[in-house]
Image (cartoon, grey):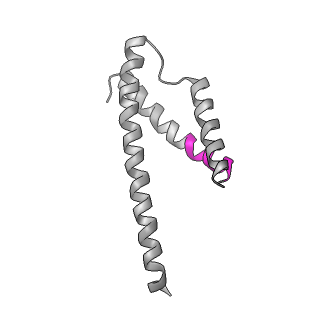
């Protein structure tokens, strides 16, 4: 039985690698966003933008058959990390 699962597990592992790589790319953009916010005097946390990102992600998730609450919760964790990184950069800690 485990042998039958090996190819599927390898496929999942490859997808997980892609997800992690995309998260890394996303956080690289967050660094650039923080630089722009610093120049513009904007705070790290913009609640309207956070709400829009979560709503868009939930809608996209729903469109591909995912539970929108799951996607919104997942994005909340991603956003929390992005805000932590931005705050650190804006405070000169990173």
- Hey, which residue is sitting farthest front in the picture? 63
Work out whether 63 lies above or below 40: below
Nearest the eye: 77 or 64:
64
Question: How many numbered marks does the figure carry?
Answer: 0
Find residue 66 and report its horizontal and vertical position in percent: 65, 54
Work out whether 60 lies above or below 4: above
Q: Does the magenta stretch include residue 74?
A: yes
Find residue 88 and report its horizontal and vertical position in percent: 38, 28
Nearest the eye: 83 or 75:
75
The magenta segment is 67-76
Q: Residue at x 47, y 15 (%)?
A: 42
Work out whether 71 lies above or below 50: below
Q: Which residue is drawn at 63% across and 53% down?
A: 64
Work out whether 58 lies above or below 10: above
Q: Is residue 34 magenta?
A: no
Q: Residue at x 38, y 16 (%)?
A: 38
Find residue 30 and report its horizontal and vertical position in percent: 40, 31
Q: In this view, does 74 lie to the left or right of 38?
A: right
Quarter containing the C terminus: top left
């Amino acid at each position: 039985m485990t042998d039958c699962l090996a190819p599927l597990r390898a496929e999942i592992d490859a997808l997980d690698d892609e997800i992690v790589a995309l998260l890394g790319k996303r956080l690289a953009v967050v660094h650039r966003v923080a630089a722009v916010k610093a120049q513009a005097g904007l705070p790290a946390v913009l609640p309207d933008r956070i709400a829009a990102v979560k709503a868009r992600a939930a809608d996209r998730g729903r469109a591909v058959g995912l539970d929108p609450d799951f996607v919104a919760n997942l994005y909340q964790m991603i956003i929390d990390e992005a805000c932590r990184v931005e705050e650190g950069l804006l405070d000169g800690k990173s």
